[in-house]
Amino acid sequence: MEILPYILEQFINGVQLGSVYALIALGYTMVYGVLRLINFAHGDVFMVGAFTGYFLLTKTKIPLPFVFFFTMVITSALGYIIEKVAYKPLRDAPRISLLITAVGVSLFLEYFLSLKSMFTPNYIPFPRPFEIKTLKVLAISITNVQITIFSTTFLCLVGLYFLVYKTKYGKAMRAISHDKETASLMGINVDRIISFTFVVGAALAGIGGILYGIAYPQINVFMGIMPGIKSFIAAVLGGIGVIHGAVLGGLLIGVSEVFVSAFLSSTLRDGIIFLILLIVLLLRPNGFFGKIIEKV
């Protein structure tokens, strides 16, 4: 086995995993940017996205682009409901109340959906929407699954960039992230923009759930826990509240996890991720791109 092609293939595998983490981390960082809230239920929205994709692929046989679209609609509606029911009534409460509520929403989604009358607590196979094919590019193997994940993630990032920096809603989101009270005085509907932010973040998490199911075709109702934690770490590493920081952090976490599994041991991969977080917080407490993190 030639070492250089192997390293490059593992790097591609890491970018594949990191792309999913980046999509989830964007939801964390966007919500924190406008509300200063760590939405720990976000990993479970990712799980709902995976299950939505599963049912659409197995029950309807619709094309993959429509699966993405309808999953985005459903997870966006879930994000909107979570914000209105669980977080909006506590908008002016102490921040610890919001944090506890976020954990409660996460546990509710996991255990409610694990009921036999809903889904199942067991692992179920995720259907692949197309036959897996491998391409050789300069002695490096790359699959059509990886191409699908890279292209979908890229389109999501381009769309998010356009939304945040080229639209009135994006300008309002950025204004609220800097100063919510002043933005309100300038005529911005803060409640509407916060809800919109939850909707966008949930849509991205739903897409991430489908991509994760395609890449690692086994899902269950507790699948959002570790990807959610790692994506939160990715957001913190990049500088929570900074969109490009979340993307960079997600890719770093994904590549690190795959390299540790490939060259050391798969049992060490989670520990190494937390070690990276510890080192970065010791050397650069505000993350790579330096927004101040408000303590809970």
Image (cartoon, rainbow, N blue to C red):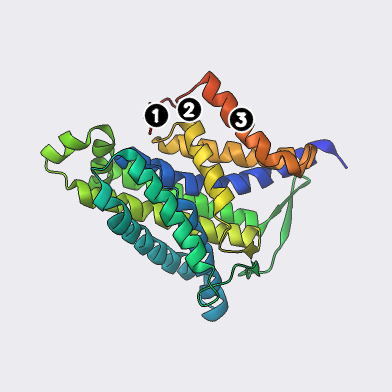
Residue 97 percent across, percent down from the top left: 34, 44
Q: Residues within 10 Å of mark 3 (few under 14, many from 20)?
A: some
Q: CA distance from mark 1 to mark 2?
A: 9 Å
- At label 1, which amino acid type do we have? Ile
Circle 2 sits in a helix, a strand or a loop, which is it? Answer: loop
Q: Nearer the viewer, residue 88 or 32?
A: 88
Q: Is residue 3 above or below residue 133?
A: above
- At label 3, which amino acid type do we have? Ile
Q: Is residue 104 above or below residue 229?
A: below
Q: Residues within 10 Å of mark 1 (few under 14, many from 20)?
A: some
Instruction: State the quadrant of the N terminus.
Output: top right
Q: Residues within 10 Å of mark 2 (few under 14, many from 20)?
A: many
Q: Which residue is mark 3?
A: 276
Residue 234 percent across, percent down from the top left: 52, 38
Mark 1 or mark 2, earlier in chain: 2
The disc placed on residue 44 is: none
Q: Are marks 1 and 3 in contact (CB under 8 Å)?
A: no
Q: Which residue is mark 2?
A: 287
Q: Residue 9 appears in which quarter of the rendering?
A: top right
Residue 268 percent across, percent down from the top left: 73, 39
Mark 1 or mark 3, earlier in chain: 3
Circle 1 sits in a helix, a strand or a loop, which is it? Answer: loop
Please tell me which residue is depicted at 35% across the width and 63% down the height of the picture: 77
Q: Which residue is mark 1?
A: 293
Q: Nearer the viewer, residue 145 or 215?
A: 215
Q: Nearer the viewer, residue 129 or 225?
A: 225
